[in-house]
Amino acid sequence: MEYFTTVSLAGFILALLWLLSVKNSRKYYLPPGPAALPLIGNLPQLDKYAPFKSFVKLSEKYGPVMTMYLGWQRTVVLVGYDAVKEALVDQADEFTGRGPVPFLFKATRGYGLGISNGERWRQLRRFTLTTLRDFGMGRKGMMEWIQEESKHMRDRIDTFKGAPLDPTFLFSCSVSNVICCLVFGQRFNFEDKQFLQLLTNIPELLRFISSPMGQMYNLFPWLMERLPGRQHTVFAYVDEVRAFIKTKIQEHKETLDPSFPRDYIDCYLIRMNQEKDNHTSEFHYDNLVSTVLNLFMAGTETTSTTLRYALAVLIKHPDMQEKMQQEIDTVIGQERSPNMEDRKSLPFTDAVIHEVQRFLDIVPFSLPHYALEDISFRGYTIPKDTVIIPLLHSVLKEEKQWATPSSFNPQHFLDQNGDFKKNPAFVPFSAGKRACVGESLARMELFIFLVSLLQHFTFSCRGGPDSINLIPEYSSFANLPRRYEIIATPR
């Protein structure tokens, strides 16, 4: 009885908040949008299995800047390249706010780089970019780490001797080891049980966020916290990752040499000690734990998932795989490791990698932005505390920007002479001041890992090309591709 009273009271309070927000919204000239219901807003108008597609459909009626209500939360959705660029790039300073995504807020305790704002975000982002670059992100030193990790990956695949394998864990280990070198100063063995357990948990987090139950948690966290369900298991996984990170930080504290920092954690601990008497400093323990959590999880899952999807695409299109191998053999051969200088001599390969990212559209919503103050945009007012969704899906699949947006087509990135061409609507890492801090690292990993794999193996699967379905298994916060057992035949 007490439980139902609590839920009823919470519902009543939310209804009052809803009525108050609707009343306040009339003071502003909001972007147009469909009529919303109390408490649940526009949720009935959204496809729970692919809500971003519903946004695109609604924009045909209401335009590229729409007001929606996701539950009681007022949300402005930006649809198409022009609107997204105008906000994130042309009015970058006003759109740097990050939305308080409930799942991420609980996972990080509200700390860290990912969902922070203001001075915390500025201090942590500047420090993180500088430190990661100092340790080689986007430079030759990092390239050599990835080349070495790609060799470990190939050696592991060789042990299967052409038998079918699920590459999910293998790719997660390899990609994660690159970020681990940067952050923890070490790589982990493919047999390390604790490391493998963490890598088993991380995909589950992304699966949960992208499921209808994960969407419910972000819309009604106060309710989901009180109900039984998978959300509690998922947060236990987060706690395991946090415990692992805390152990590594303690090990770093015990072996720290301030004159010789080994990695990101060392540099942070040195900075934290330097600013221990500065009460406005954001360099404290909670921000360290959550920023490392951001880097570790984001630096593992999105790139390894994209790599796995790339192989599914190449099995689906064996002619493309063969053309890439011919290009790679001509330019690099099968003996030396690929490097980033090779990319300009491999236009078709580069085009396929870009098209994989465009077509997968791994984070269709981006991470939500947030109006920290009232924002004037295209003659409308976006009131303070409004969530803003720059719909990356609508840019990566926009008919004005791509010749065949709903088909996999590497020609999107090739000119008439077969040379690589850029497209400003290629925004899988978002754009502006909140673009992904690991973009240069992810680009380097995708290129070196994929080229290295194609140098040494031809990929197929038991059911043949027709058995591959490129439609994601889950679509919401992320597009998560289906898992397949692949056959890697040595060349």
Image: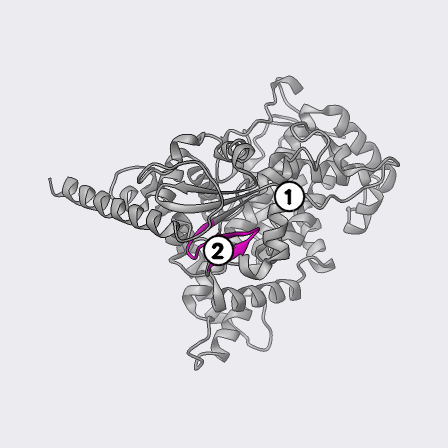
Q: Quadrant of residue 315?
A: top right
Residue 457 locus on image (x, y percent): 72, 32
- Image side of residue 343 versus residue 169, left or right: right
Whole-angstrom CA distance, mark 1 to mark 2, is 20 Å
Residue at point 48%, 46% (across, down): 76
Residue 112: percent from left, percent from top = 46, 61
* Magenta stretch, residue numbers: 374-387
Q: Quadrant of the N terminus?
A: top left
Q: Earlier in the sequence, mark 1 or mark 2?
A: 1
Residue 6 spot, x, y in % from top left: 17, 45
Crowding at dot 2, Cα within 10 Å, few <14 / some 14-19 / many 20+, comes out as: many
Relative to the observer, which residue lies in front, 277 or 171?
277
Viewer-nearest residue: 115 or 46: 46
Instruction: Report the residue marked by disc 2.
Output: 98
Residue 330 within the magenta-colored segment of the rendering: no
Q: Secondary structure at mark 2?
A: loop
One can see residue 247 in this view: no
Q: Nearer the viewer, mark 1 or mark 2?
A: 1
Mark 1 in CB contact with mark 2 (< 8 angstroms): no
Q: Amino acid at mark 2?
A: Arg
SS at mark 1 in the image = helix
**Label drawn at residue 81:** 1
Q: Is residue 373 left or right of residue 84?
A: left
Residue 167 visible? The answer is yes
- Name above or below for residue 158 compared with residue 138: above
Which mark, residue 270?
none
Image location of residue 205, percent across then percent down = 44, 42
Using the rendered view, name the quadrant where residue 42 is placed: top left
- Which amino acid does the dot numbered 1 rest on? Tyr
Question: Which residue is at the front of the view, 35 or 479?
Answer: 35
Left or right placement of residue 8 versus residue 480 in this view? left
